Amino acid sequence: MAFLRRWVAWSLVLVVAIALPGCSLSQFKTQTARVPQYVDTMLNAPKTFNSSQSKEANNVFGLIYEGLMTQNGLTGEIEPALAESWEFSADQLKIIFTLRPNLKWSDGEPLTADDVVFSYNDVYLNEAIPTDTRDVLRIGKSRALPKVRKLDDRRVEFSSPEPFAPLLRTAGVIDILPAHALKKLVDTPDRKGNPQFISAWGVDTDPSEIIVNGPYQLERYDTNQRVVFRRNPYYWRYQNPEQATGNIERIVWKIVESSDTALLQFRSGGLDSVGVVPDKFSLLKREEDSGNFTIYEGGPDFGTTFILFNLNRGRRNNKPLVNPIKSQWFNNVKFRQAVAYAIDRDRMLANLYQGLGLPQNSPISVQSPYYLAPEEGLKVYNYDPQKAKQLLKAAGFTYNNKGQLLDAKKNRVRFTLMSGAGSTTGVKLGTQIKEDLRKIGIQVDYTPIAFNTLVDKLDDSLDWDCVMLGLTGGVEPNSGANVWSTEGGLHMFNQKPQPPSEPIQSFTVSEWEQEISDLYIEGAQELDEAKRKAIYAKTQKITQEYLPFIYLINPLALAAVRNDFEGIQFTALGGVNWNIYDIQEVRE
């Protein structure tokens, strides 16, 4: 469950695996077969074990941490987690959470209201600590933050200075962190004067030092190879047999950069589940019985897939972040609209997704009640290369005798499109986009690169032209506030760098960009559901008019899981193991 939007490698949040040199996966499974276990995969190596510093969707935190509440992966409803109950004040500006009795951390220390207050006041609400989580907690045009205070060892009060509709769904699901292990790192500066906490619990940290409250804890991390989890005996559900019927003692996530290798491993019996890319669906469907697995279909994926141009007109050290020639193209809305019309999404859906999905037209998930359908007035960009050329000519572009697109100063229109490497479907998407744009005279240099390198470019160096990427989604639009706020940590098309990144000069915000940012504030302030829907409908219309993201395909969420497990409730929202505490291995 994603309480805020995070980057994914390009479109599908797939979990896949590779074989390791000198150590086969089957050997590892045999060596650890004494306890029930689940072997899954992770796309790309983790960048951090510090929950507050993570931006990636493919992370470990869903297994090792919980918040005061959790989202049911089947229904999308908010349910009790570390808090057994909550109560609103009459004016809806306060929530009092009551923790379950006798909660403990994975090291056996008590988990109390002090940990909740620390997590919010010392970490998430602390301006000295860069974290995207803070973006979804900001309230109103003042960008104020909620107040969090301890009432007693089990009760914590959250208060908002003004109405904030997502307060419960947003604030309640953020990971609670251990004060006894981390507070001293928040209070102690490093050589640059920043809290040591920012760099704490990196991937080189001994897993035994990482204190958690979720169903599993880190057992070991073999760099770029695997992450191993073991059952956390102090997890609150495991203290009550009625709350957890599962028996999985160990989880192994293999780290992968290739979905093809993952599929090979799954088909050979080395994995217990794998994300199913559409072009392999027919192959796997034929093998369900012989392979002893079931393909689960979870409905349209909650995430979004898109390409985006770097609209940042800022400078660092008197040097433009983006080549000024290219920046003029990218910041021309007719240019972006032309690119949208030039991408043949119907062909993409038919050939690359085997028809298992729909064209994507909105930043808000199709399943969300706030989604605006094309039939309700949302602009769409159906394939129309002639319309694309007309828009380009109207914007001052011309064609030479070779059919190559030139700008008003006769510069050839050419840019680099990057995406995360490792997915064959992703590479095919990039290749088709390159071909489609060539038909309107644009030369695209398509370059898949390591996902972590791509994230660094988007987050820090800001040195890129065009990127194909994805974002996780959810029911509540405000989970995307860190994308649409002009100050947001995932406002990637015009990123204002977050500390400790080097600042930029001449940062400029477009009027439409500011309007979306303001509307997200207004939507969070509005308590009337009908009015909220109207506000978010307007944001979707603006995003489709100005195209900070050019959306591609919304695929069906598909996963293949061995029949050796009971309790699987796969959904697009929750994935395979959102209810891992209720999943049982029944392997004979």
Image (tube, grey):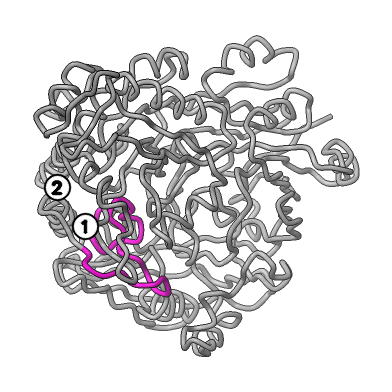
Task: Name the residue beneath numbered marker 1.
Answer: 165
Residue 72 in view, yes or no: yes
Amino acid at dot 2: Arg
Amino acid at dot 1: Ala
Instruction: Give the residue at the far top of this rendering.
Output: 286
Which is more toward the observer, 183 or 515?
515
Which is more toward the observer, 152 or 213?
213
Coordinates of residue 55 in the picture (x, y in percent): 46, 57
Please name the residue shown 28% across and 24% down the image: 404
Relative vertical location of residue 347 with respect to residue 102 in this rendering, above or below: above
Residue 136 in view, yes or no: no
Alpha carbon separation for disc pair 1 and 2? 9 Å
Residue 99 vs residue 525: left or right? right
Relative vertical location of residue 193 with respect to residue 444 in this rendering, above or below: below
Please name the residue shown 41% across and 13% down the image: 350
Coordinates of residue 531 in the picture (x, y in percent): 9, 46
Q: CB under 8 Å between callouts 1 and 2? A: yes
Residue 210 vs residue 386: left or right? right
Which is more toward the observer, 153 or 508?
508
Q: Start and end of the magenta stretch?
A: 484-507
Toward which corner of the image does residue 373 lie, by quadrant? top left
Task: Name the residue beneath numbered marker 2.
Answer: 532
Q: Earlier in the sequence, mark 1 or mark 2?
A: 1
Coordinates of residue 34 in the picture (x, y in percent): 88, 45
